[in-house]
Image (tube, grey):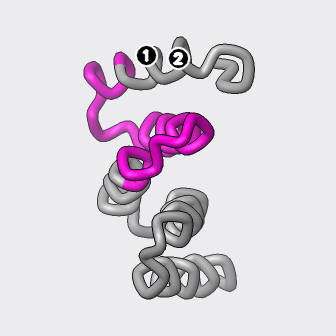
């Protein structure tokens, strides 16, 4: 899905993918990215957090969660996820 050209269609597609496969981490991450691009930061954070819950070693999910939390002003939480992403990337 091309999020840059039609974010609404991408969001709908990722939601459908998660309806069929709610534990599919890439769909949570991609939906979070697309929601973030459209300013829906709270919901984006929820999808990144779910991706991290499902796969705690998923670096991109954790980095995106940290970035989104920082944008939301939740800097202490963001710092924890940035640190964990850094630790995971050094493995």
Give the residue at x 65% y 25%.
3
The answer to which of 22 and 36 lies nearer the viewer is: 36
Q: Position of residue 56 (x, y in %)?
A: 40, 67
Give above or below for 19 relative to 88: above
Evaluate whether residue 58 shows in this view. Answer: no
| SS type, badge 2 | helix
Report whether 51 appears left or right of 62.
Answer: left
Give the residue displayed 41% in from the left and 81% down from the top.
Answer: 77
Looking at the image, which residue is at 42% across and 76% down? 74
Residues 87 and 36: in front is: 36
* 14 up-or-down from 80: above or below: above
Question: In the depicted view, which residue is nearer to us: 16 or 12?
Answer: 12
Query: What element does badge 1 sit on?
Result: helix
Marks 2/1: CA–CA distance = 6 Å
63 and 76: which is toward the camera: 76
On the image, numbered disc 1 is attached to which residue?
12
| Pointer 2 with pointer 1, Cβ within 8 A | yes
Q: Residue 16 is drawn in which quadrant?
A: top left
- Residue 22 lies, in percent from the top left, at 27, 34
The residue indicated by pointer 2 is: 8
**Of helix, strand and loop, which mostly describes the magenta segment?**
helix
Q: Which mark is residue 72?
A: none
Specify the segment rendered in magenta. Answer: 16-45
Left or right of 45 on screen, residue 23: left
């Amino acid at each position: 899905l091309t999020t840059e050209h039609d974010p609404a269609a991408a969001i709908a597609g990722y939601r459908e993918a998660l309806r069929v496969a709610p534990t599919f981490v890439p769909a949570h991450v991609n939906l979070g990215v697309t929601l973030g691009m459209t300013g829906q930061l709270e919901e984006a954070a929820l999808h990144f957090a779910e991706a991290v819950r499902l796969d705690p070693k998923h670096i991109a999910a954790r980095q995106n969660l940290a970035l989104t939390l920082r944008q939301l002003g939740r800097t202490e939480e963001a710092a924890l996820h940035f640190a964990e992403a850094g630790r995971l990337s050094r493995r």
